[in-house]
Image: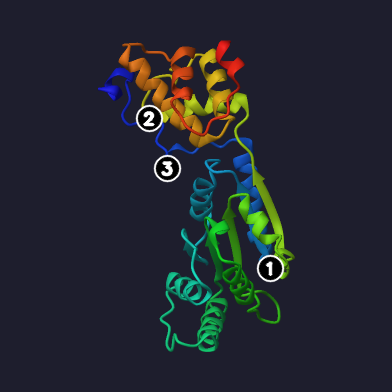
């Protein structure tokens, strides 16, 4: 009934990353450009950081979708693994059938040969790690050692890390200073700007089937931006709740009152009280 009321085919403000709803804000495009340029160099680590809900996972999926057939990817969405298990997980992602898993020396030897085989076929290996802030320090060091594998002319693999700001804190530890020095490209993802948040709301509504994306008048979208600080995930949460409130009243547009009630009902927001009196 919610969908019919607003003339939608699907819910426009889910919190599960969905590439069909991608909105290319300036920062999102800059981050993608950083990834592509960094990958083109073929050396070092690339690091993308941002607060929870700023779109890192969606960016990661968009990045992976741009890779060509000659780029082989090992994607780890949950890398909270001790070093030995991490290496096995990467090997499995690369399609490497390992022998003698009990000793790291044999593991690395097989890795090296597999990477050499990939290089001989003209393929580039990319290890893409989401939620990298959850990795133990020992596993970060194991990743650095793995990145040592090279020919006389180039590295055999490249590592891309996506993580929350805690990743930077972890990399500040002297125990992983060598890895930190290998980060050649880095981008910190900000939230949406106010104008972008307005366009973001309309964009998602149109993708979901709304005729013009005009469910949020400018005053409502500005207030929603302030409540969310431009964090896309919070924009989605607030927009969904506000639309439910509008639907409950039989309204086709979301008012400032709906946004305020949605904000008060959402934990973790830091909107100033005087905003609510506007």
Point out the image quarter for the N terminus.
Answer: top left
Q: Residue at x 57, y 70 (%)?
A: 139
User: Measured from the top left, where is residue 251 in percent x and y?
Assistant: 35, 11
Q: Is residue 214 left or right of residue 147?
A: left
Q: Residue at x 53, y 30 (%)?
A: 269
Q: Are marks 2 and 1 in contact (CB under 8 Å)?
A: no
Between discs 3 and 1, the one toward the N terminus: 3
Q: Residue at x 50, y 77 (%)?
A: 84
Q: How many C-alpha atoms fall within 10 Å of the one at disc 1: few (<14), some, or many (≥20)?
A: some
Q: How many C-alpha atoms fall within 10 Å of the one at disc 3: few (<14), some, or many (≥20)?
A: few
Residue identified by numbered label 1 = 176
Q: Secondary structure at mark 3?
A: loop
When asked about the image quadrant of residue 160, the answer is bottom right
When asked about the image quadrant of residue 156, the answer is bottom right
Residue 214 appears in view: no
Image depth: mark 2 or mark 1 in front: 1
The Cα–Cα distance between marks 3 and 1, rounded to whole angstroms, is: 34 Å
The Cα–Cα distance between marks 3 and 2, rounded to whole angstroms, is: 12 Å
Viewer-side residue, 232 vs 26: 232
Viewer-side residue, 260 vs 267: 267
Q: How many C-alpha atoms fall within 10 Å of the one at disc 2: few (<14), some, or many (≥20)?
A: many
Q: Is 118 situated above or below 51?
A: below
Q: Is residue 108 left or right of residue 187?
A: left
Point out the image quarter for the C terminus.
Answer: top right
Between discs 2 and 1, the one toward the N terminus: 1
Residue identified by numbered label 3 = 18
Residue identified by numbered label 2 = 208
Viewer-side residue, 266 vs 8: 266
């Amino acid at each position: 009934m919610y969908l019919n009321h607003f003339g939608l085919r699907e819910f426009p403000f889910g919190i599960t990353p969905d590439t069909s709803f991608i909105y290319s804000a300036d920062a999102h495009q800059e981050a993608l450009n950083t990834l592509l340029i960094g990958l083109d160099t073929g050396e070092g680590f690339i690091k993308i950081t941002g607060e929870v809900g700023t779109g890192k996972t969606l960016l990661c999926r968009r990045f992976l979708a741009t890779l060509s057939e000659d780029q082989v990817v090992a994607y780890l969405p949950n890398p909270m693994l001790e070093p030995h298990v991490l290496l096995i997980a990467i090997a499995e992602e690369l399609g490497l059938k390992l022998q003698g898993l009990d000793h790291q020396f044999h593991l690395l030897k097989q890795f090296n040969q597999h990477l050499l085989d990939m290089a001989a076929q003209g393929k580039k290996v990319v290890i893409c790690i989401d939620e990298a802030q959850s990795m133990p320090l020992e596993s970060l060091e194991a990743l650095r050692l793995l990145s040592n594998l090279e020919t006389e002319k180039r590295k055999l693999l490249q590592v891309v890390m996506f993580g929350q700001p805690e990743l930077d804190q972890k990399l500040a530890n002297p125990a992983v200073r060598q890895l930190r020095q290998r980060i050649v490209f880095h981008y910190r993802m900000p939230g949406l700007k106010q104008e972008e948040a307005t366009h973001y709301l309309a964009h998602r509504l149109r993708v979901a089937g709304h005729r013009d994306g005009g469910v949020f008048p400018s005053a409502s979208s500005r207030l929603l931006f302030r409540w969310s600080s431009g964090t896309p995930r919070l924009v989605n949460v607030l927009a969904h709740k506000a639309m439910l409130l509008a639907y409950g009243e039989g309204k086709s547009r979301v008012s400032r009152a709906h946004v305020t009630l949605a904000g008060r009902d959402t934990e973790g927001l830091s909107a100033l009280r005087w905003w609510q009196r506007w």
